[in-house]
Amino acid sequence: MMEGTEPPTEGTLEKVATTLTRLMDKTTIWVKTRWVLLAVLMLTFAVRIYFVEGFYIVTYGLGIYVLNLFIGFLSPAVDPEEDAGLPTKEREEFRPFSRKLPEFKFWRSAFYAVLTSIVMTFFAVFDLPVFWPILLAYFILLVCLTLKDRIKHMIKHNYVPISFGKQTYGELTKVKAGANAEKGDSKDSK
């Protein structure tokens, strides 16, 4: 072994982990950028699978894992059947929807899963012979059944897990400067 080189110590690995965590935390505010990056990474994985013509079991595992993450993302943190957390009547207090799996953790877990899957495609040991149409059919069946169950749950307990920003009321909340000025002028003229 050369004198100037030392094996990585726990301190070096800890610094790398801290730096990676800091970089991931900085991406918290860039929601669209993060999801575009994940989409590009998934596209890269799909292109790799297409050209290698293998690793279908890795792709299936990735699909099942991302489906599981998606179900956690759609699910409420507290199941309404166990706890009456969501209001069921008009008079009950409004409680915002809180997820079992927050958006950032969903993205981070999916990002790491796709990176891991890409790395796995470079090792032949993960290229198991399998008849891929059966895996695809089974995966589609799982997606349909799982999402059907999740949608029934949403309808039964009257919640929507996706919001598109702050609700606006259009014309009702606009202040008309001209109307206020005219009222003020008419009072002054009396």
Image: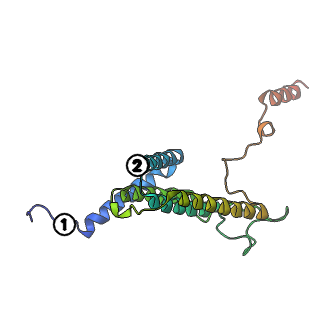
Name the amino acid type tagged 1.
Pro
Residue 177 position within the rendered picture, expressed as x and y whole percent measured from the top left: 77, 29
Residue that protrudes farthest toward the top in the picture: 189
Measure the C-alpha gap from mark 2 to mark 1: 33 Å
Residue that protrudes farthest toward the right in the picture: 190
Report the residue marked by disc 1.
Answer: 7
Residue 28 position within the rendered picture, expressed as x and y whole percent measured from the top left: 49, 52
Residue 64 position within the rendered picture, expressed as x and y whole percent measured from the top left: 54, 62
Residue 182 position within the rendered picture, expressed as x and y whole percent measured from the top left: 84, 26
Counting the numbered discs, the total is 2
Q: How crowded is mark 2: few (under 14 residues within 10 Å), some or many (20 or more)?
A: some
Instruction: Report which quarter residue 180 is drawn in.
Output: top right
As rendered, which of 98 and 176 lies closer to the eye?
98
Residue 48's label in the rendered image is 2
Instruction: Report which quarter residue 83 is drawn in.
Output: bottom right
Quadrant of image for the N terminus: bottom left
User: Would residue 116 be found to the left or right of residue 16 on screen?
Assistant: right
Foreground tag (2 vs 1): 2
Q: How crowded is mark 1: few (under 14 residues within 10 Å), some or many (20 or more)?
A: few
**Vertical relation: 178 (above or below) 153:** above
Residue at the (47%, 46%) spot, across then down: 43
- Secondary structure beneath dot 2 equals helix
Residue at the (85%, 61%) spot, across then down: 90
As rendered, which of 64 and 37 lies closer to the eye?
64
**Vertical relation: 166 (above or below) 160:** above
Name the amino acid type tagged 2.
Arg
Sequence-first tag of 2 and 1:
1
Residue at the (43%, 58%) spot, across then down: 112
- Secondary structure beneath dot 1 equals loop
